[in-house]
Structures are given as C-alpha cells and as structure tokens.
Image (tube, grey):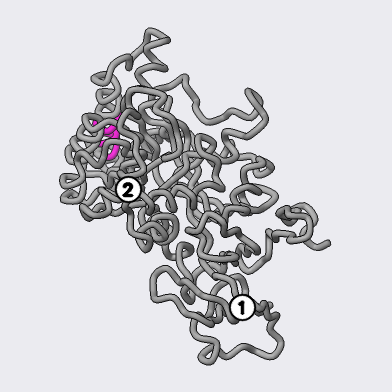
Amino acid sequence: MTLAITGGYVVPVEGDPIDGGTVLISEGRIIAVGPDADVDVPEDAEVVDAAGSWVLPGFVESHGHLGVCEEAEGWAGEDTNEMTDPNGARLRALDAINPADLAFADALSGGVTTVVIKPGSGNPIGGQTVAVKCWGRTVDEMLLREPVSVKSALGENPKRVYGNKDKTPSTRQGVAAIIRDAFTKAQDYKAKREHAAAENKPFDRDPTLEVLVRVLDGELPWCQHTHRADDIATAMRLAEEFGYRLVINHGTEAHLLADLIAERGHPVIIGPLFTSRSKVELRHRSLRNPGILARAGVDLAIMTDHPVVPIHFLVHQATLAVKEGLDSETALKAITSNPARIMGLDDRVGALKPGLDADIVLWSDDPLNVMSRALRVWIGGREVYTYDEHTGEGVTANPYHRDR
C-alpha cells in the first residue's frame, strides 16, 4: 500500500522544514519527502490531509525500561536487574520485555515510536540492550536491532546492591575493578580464541566474554550509567584503557566536564530531568545542563529512564530544557536523529528521509509546545495510534486484532 501525508508542516529534522509538504510511503518505508508540488503521488495512494498539522519522525527514546519494569504490576513485572552476578554481560533485555506493558501505549501518545530498552543499574555490568518499535504482539515482531549496546553502571547503585550483600563490589574501587577484571579476561579470551582458530582446535565458548569481546572490537558501544563527575572521569579512564566506544548515560554532572567530554567525543544521553534530587549523585540535576553540554559541542540525546519519568513526557523534557537555555533545533534532534545516530539506528529511524522506516507522527502544533498533542502515529506505514477528538482519548490499535 502507498500512503501520502500531504499539506502539512513537514519537519524532516535533518533538513529544513517544508510548509505544505508531502511524505510518501510505500511498503513501510519513506520513498519521498518534499513540497506538495514536487512529490508525485500515485492515483491509487491513500491520502492523509495534514493541513494545519506538523509532520515529524517518531521520537527515539535512547534509555528506558519499558516492558522490563512494567507499570502497575509490582514485583511480578519487575525484571530490570538480575542482581545475583556483578557481570551480567550475557543477559539480554530482549528476553524480559512484555509488549503488553501499558507504557508502550503511553509512548505512542507522546510520539515515541522507537525505544532502546536497557537492563537496570544494579550491576557493574548489567547486560545487553535492545531497540524495539512501540507496537506489536511479540518483542520479536517489534525488534529493530539486538543487541544495540552493553549496559554498565558506576557509582551508588551497584555499590549499594552488593554492599548490602557483603559482597564485592561494595565501593567505587570495587565497581571499577569488576569492570576492569571483566575486560582483562575478555582480552585473554579473545587471544585464546584466535589461537585456537589458527590451530584449527576446538574452543569452549563463554557467552559473557563473547559479548565483551564485541565491545572491545568496537561492534557494541558501552552505555555507562554514571551521574557524578568523578564517576564520569572513571568511565572515560576505563574507556581509554580498553579502547571501547563509551556512551555516557544520565550524565547528571557531565556539564562540569563538558569540555573534556566534547574533546574526547563521548556522546551523552542525559536524564531523567523531571526527578527530585533523591540521592547524592543527583544534587546537581538541572534542566540547564543539556544546554551547557550542547554549547560545549557534546553530542546530546535526552531520555526519560522510564518509568522514572513517564515515557510520554520525553518531549516535555526537551521543551523545558529549551526554556532553560537549550536551542530548540538541538532539543528536537536530541529526541530524534541524535539518539538514533548515537545508538547506531540512524539507517532506520530518527528523521524523515527516503529509505528510512515510515515511523511518522502527526502533531496538532509544534511538539515543543506543551499544548500540542500527537494526533496520529504510524509505525512502518501502519497507523497504530489515533487521538479521538470526540472522546478526548487516544486509541491504540490492538496488535492482536490487526486485520479487524
């Protein structure tokens, strides 16, 4: 089926806005974006009149726990942290996601169509992350890419978890040592594996070390949970020592090291920004920080850490960051093309351009206006969410009855 969304204020993100533009879709992909007069719409295409509306790519949440930390489920839906092994590199968020989590419908209502779901921060090495679309019957149907990165944590969380068990790591020294030991073993494992292959000898595989070798080889970035400036410095120290691609996650005090972070080219996925200062690490949490990082030249994305901040408030965090000094163009990129690029998903999502997935949101106005709302949402060219003006409620398509 061919779909044409016409007459809207089209914001490609990576390109100038088009007042009176058309987005043409076929077989789940965008095939053309341009002024209405320049896009040839086939006669048999379904046409959506977007006049008076804003047309944008679906937002990309680069750090959330949808489906692994289910809403309104309590203990039964809590699968975020496997806090029995400090090195959980072999663990996969993919295996714990429940697509029926209420948060996926909330995501659509907030214009979020792609989420990178990560294990929690209870372990020094938490496990593998996964990128999914926000609609489907099974996580396999929703899957965009897996694994996307490996999650690791420094600071208060892992030392608290294992300190309470009277086990290593109970200090920041211990947390860093666990990570360093793991990568040292991975280096040795890689050398032994290569030697066995050269000698054509059998080799016993280790699922944990196999993942860490992929990090060392640059295949998977290292998503480092880290808030405090000293922990961010440790993250950069470890990354330099082992040569892996570091992505700073949270970065509450990253603004204090903004020049160093920019110089070394480490992206920062900042947030959540709507929280109280509930622990020491968060004492410098501020909506001013994204603007400081952006002005220093840091590659920036904004995240909710859902359920810490509800997923549909992703855009509102960007809006209030603009209020506190972040420029609006960067704010929009921080929830679309930037997280897509940082997480290696920009060949599929994050902008409106030919070849990318047709994940498109029709907004009543500029999404950075808090009074604007998502009116219609398409994922892969399929309409999955509609706001009903008469009832004042959003309606999410039932993935179990997709042909009805």
Q: Position of residue 62 (x, y in %)?
A: 44, 48
Q: Position of residue 333 (x, y in %)?
A: 39, 60
Left or right placement of residue 192 versus residue 307 in this view: left
Left or right placement of residue 342 versus residue 100 in this view: left
Tell me if residue 366 comes above or below residue 50 in the rendering. above
Q: Residue at x 60, y 81 (%)?
A: 6
Tell me if residue 94 comes above or below residue 84 in the rendering. below
Residue closest to the eye, 130 or 390: 390
* Residue 188 in which image quadrant: top left
* Residue 213 in which image quadrant: top left
Q: Residue at x 49, y 48 (%)?
A: 314
Q: Position of residue 126 (x, y in %)?
A: 42, 31
Tell me if residue 357 comes above or below residue 321 in the rendering. below
The residue that disc 2 covers is 290
Q: Secondary structure at mark 2?
A: helix
Check if residue 336 falls in the magenta segment. Answer: no
The residue that disc 1 covers is 51
Check if residue 189 falls in the magenta segment. Answer: yes
Q: Residue at x 38, y 54 (%)?
A: 322
Bounds of the magenta segment: 182-190
Tell me if residue 346 comes above or below residue 118 in the rendering. below
Is residue 199 at all visible to an observer of this figure? Answer: no
Left or right placement of residue 82 versus residue 277 in this view: right
Indicate the amino acid at tag 2.
Pro
Q: Secondary structure at mark 1?
A: loop
Indicate the amino acid at tag 1.
Ala
Is residue 381 at all visible to an observer of this figure? Answer: yes
* Residue 278 in which image quadrant: top left
Left or right placement of residue 188 versus residue 369 in this view: left
Principal secondary structure, stretch drawn in magenta = helix
User: Distance between the Cα atoms at labels 1 and 2?
Assistant: 33 Å
